[in-house]
């Protein structure tokens, strides 16, 4: 393994999912739903397979039906208009979108400012692109993890090329507010930065929180690459359909990298996701309401078990603080948890460069059936 990747080892998700299997534990680690997405969308995939749509290499930028549906979704939800031919690119999940965007836009030596804790592929992809990551740490403040905007400003130097933003934020569940996004946008314009914004949890925002795409702010559309995922939005994480929307020059750049990563992916599933994006608003509202109920179920269980809970404003993850349980190291805690009570979780420290900052935090996924969450809560209760 080369020096760029040596520090990363095996992803925590693979390690923890294997541990869940070998111990027969409830897997609240890796974030994937235990219920597949809508029947009619699965039927659409079957039809595409049977009718021979997408069984051979689809077009490099994605099938036209899907690009059109992605553009229509951005218009319908956010009033953002994108040309399906030049401003939309279909990728092999959001994971490839992140990789292709960073490989296309970062020069060796460029600094990339990202919100810490960060989704693990960010650090690895910045490294593969030869960039230097500059973490800005979200810190606990009155029940949620917040961004210090002065720290963000101070992190930008003459070498900064790109801001890598994620809202709703994995693993903390933070949803950046309109005010925070305004400052980020002003900074990007003032310092002439590119922005890659991972918005895969765009449909999972709760209570008063609102998802506002960074691309909607003044001066941002032409400098922002926005990332979405059918895996997250329609509960088909195995299909690996993701996308970017951006200005033509940036889309062309990302396409240049993407064509040598996978070239294309997910042929028949692209047609099915095109239909999924056209589901009525009620699908998105029901999805959100269902996840909200699950959030409250698991959050209550974790509180009763003695954790400090950061009730998330978005995503399907809950970050907890384990110190009230007399624990201080999330790695040790998560490695022992399956034996202690048959539940798997993720130590947030893996999402930090400043590992010590993340040490006492542990993430639980709640995209699971109600009965599974109830069982997990009752197992966790034995820790109290
Ligand atoms: N970004 C974030 C923040 C995620 O949590 C995930 C998946 N858990 C991804 C990207 C990757 O999405 P996909 O499965 O579409 O590759
Ligand atoms: N994004 C998911 C999570 O945060 C997992 C994706 C993966 O396994 N790479 O749990």
Image (tube, rainbow, N blue to C red):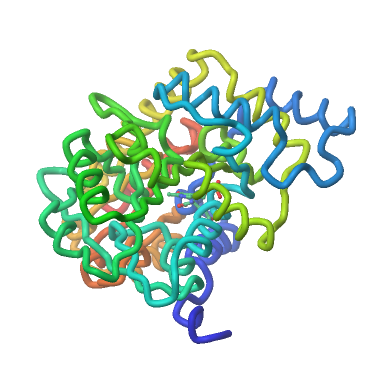
x 37%, y 49%: residue? 170
Residue situated in front as seen by the camera: 289 or 134:
134
x 18%, y 57%: residue? 152
Residue 295, percent across and down? Answer: 35, 34
Would you say 375 lies left or right of 211 here? right
Give the vertical position of 268 relative to 332 (above or below). above
Residue 8, percent across and down? Answer: 47, 75
Would you say residue 369 is visible in this rendering?
Answer: yes
Residue situated in front as seen by the camera: 271 or 313:
271
Give the vertical position of 310 relative to 64 (above or below). below
Residue 130, percent across and down? Answer: 45, 75
Give the vertical position of 325 relative to 77 (above or below). below
x 63%, y 32%: residue? 67
Would you say 71 lies left or right of 155 here? right
Tell me where residue 116 sits by quadrant.
Answer: bottom left
Residue 164, percent across and down? Answer: 36, 55
Quadrant (top left, top right, bottom left, bottom right) of the N terminus = bottom right
How many marks overall? 0
x 33%, y 39%: residue? 214
Would you say 146 lies left or right of 364 here? left
Would you say residue 34 is visible in this rendering?
Answer: no
């Amino acid at each position: 393994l080369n020096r760029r990747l040596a520090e990363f080892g095996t992803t925590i998700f693979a390690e923890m999912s294997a541990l869940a299997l070998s111990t027969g534990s409830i897997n609240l680690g890796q974030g994937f739903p235990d219920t597949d997405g809508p029947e009619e969308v699965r039927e659409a995939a079957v039809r595409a397979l049977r009718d021979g749509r997408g069984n051979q290499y689809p077009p490099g930028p994605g099938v036209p039906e899907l690009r059109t549906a992605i553009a229509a979704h951005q218009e319908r939800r956010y009033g953002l208009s994108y040309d399906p031919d030049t401003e939309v690119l279909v990728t092999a999940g959001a994971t490839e979108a992140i990789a292709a965007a960073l490989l296309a836009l970062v020069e060796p030596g460029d600094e990339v400012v990202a919100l810490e804790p960060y989704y693990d592929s960010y650090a690895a992809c910045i490294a593969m692109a030869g960039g230097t990551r500059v973490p800005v740490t979200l810190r606990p403040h009155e029940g949620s993890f917040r961004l210090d905007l002065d720290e963000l400003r101070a992190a930008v130097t003459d070498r900064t090329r790109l801001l890598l933003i994620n809202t709703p934020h994995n693993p903390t569940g933070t949803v950046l507010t309109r005010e925070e996004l305004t400052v980020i946008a002003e900074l990007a314009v003032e310092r002439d930065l590119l922005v890659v914004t991972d918005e895969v949890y765009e449909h999972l925002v709760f209570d008063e929180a609102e998802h506002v795409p960074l691309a909607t702010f003044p001066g941002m559309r032409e400098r922002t690459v926005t990332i979405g995922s059918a895996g997250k939005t329609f509960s088909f994480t195995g299909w690996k359909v993701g996308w970017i929307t951006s200005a033509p020059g940036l889309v062309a750049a990302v396409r240049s990298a993407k064509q040598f990563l996978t070239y294309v992916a997910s042929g028949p599933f692209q047609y099915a996701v095109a239909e999924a994006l056209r589901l009525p608003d009620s699908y998105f509202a029901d999805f959100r309401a269902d996840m909200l109920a699950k959030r409250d179920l698991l959050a209550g269980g974790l509180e009763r078990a003695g954790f400090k809970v950061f009730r998330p404003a978005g995503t399907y993850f809950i970050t907890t603080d384990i110190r009230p349980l007399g624990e201080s190291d999330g790695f040790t805690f998560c490695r022992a948890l399956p034996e202690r009570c048959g539940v798997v979780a993720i130590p947030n420290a893996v999402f930090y460069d400043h590992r010590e900052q993340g040490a006492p935090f542990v993430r639980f996924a709640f995209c699971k059936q109600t009965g599974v969450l109830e069982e997990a809560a009752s197992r966790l209760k034995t820790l109290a």
